[in-house]
Image (cartoon, rainbow, N blue to C red):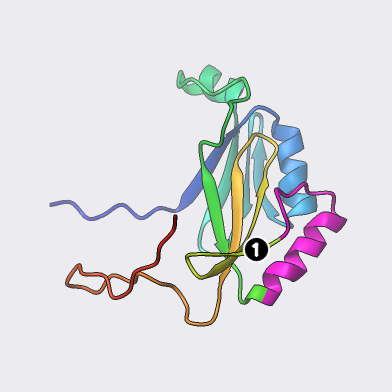
Amino acid sequence: MSPKPNITDVCLITRTLDESVTFYTEKLGFTPRSRMPGFADFEGPGLILALWDARKLTETTGVPGQLTESSGHGVMLACELDSPAAIDETYQALLAKGVEVYSPPADYPWNARCLYFSGPSGELWEYFAWNTGGMPGVVPATGATTTSVDTK
């Protein structure tokens, strides 16, 4: 059996590369790592965030990129912050930078305080922090869950 693949990069396909680069550098504070025609990537904590222009992806590889806006989100990127208070502070900072969020931070049934917003090509972002008691539903090595949370 071959080893499990190590995910090193998350690559978002964008319809507006320049707008996306601006969003990730100026509004979310990512540090650029490389930039080429139709492509950019950013340093991340243990992971590279990359952007491909949809047209350049198709032109270069033959793989079709989504060129029109969809009616819903196709990918969500989740970032764990240190505390529920950090979620509230980040919300204020994002608003000050002009990021449109879906609603103010809220506590959800899975015991997390969360904040949701979209990137320039419809990618959904979730910033979350565990409330007191931490993450529910942790699966022990045996495969049985230790707790249950109703997410309805």
In the shown orientation, is residue 15 left or right of residue 3?
right
Q: How far from the left and from the top, in percent, is residue 137?
A: 35, 69
Kindly identify the amino acid type of the residue bearing the numbered disc 1. Answer: Ala
Tell me the residue at 66%/29% (across/down).
Answer: 37
Q: Depth check: 2 or 92 in front?
A: 92
Tell me the residue at 73%/69% (across/down).
Answer: 88
In the shown orientation, is residue 73 left or right of residue 87?
left
Q: Residues within 10 Å of mark 1 (few under 14, many from 20)?
A: some
* Residue lying furthest bottom: 132
* Residue lying furthest left: 1
| Secondary structure of the residue carrying numbered label 1 | strand
Q: Magenta includes 101? A: yes
Q: Depth check: 65 or 136 in front?
A: 136
Q: How far from the left and from the top, in percent, is residue 3?
A: 22, 55
Does 140 appear above or below 20?
A: below
Q: How far from the left and from the top, in percent, is residue 42?
A: 63, 51
Q: How far from the left and from the top, in percent, is residue 111?
A: 50, 70
For the record, the magenta segment spans 85-104
Does 114 appear above or below 20?
A: below
**Residue 39 figure quarter:** top right
Q: Magenta includes 71? A: no
Specify the principal SS of the magenta part.
helix
Q: Which residue is mark 1?
A: 106
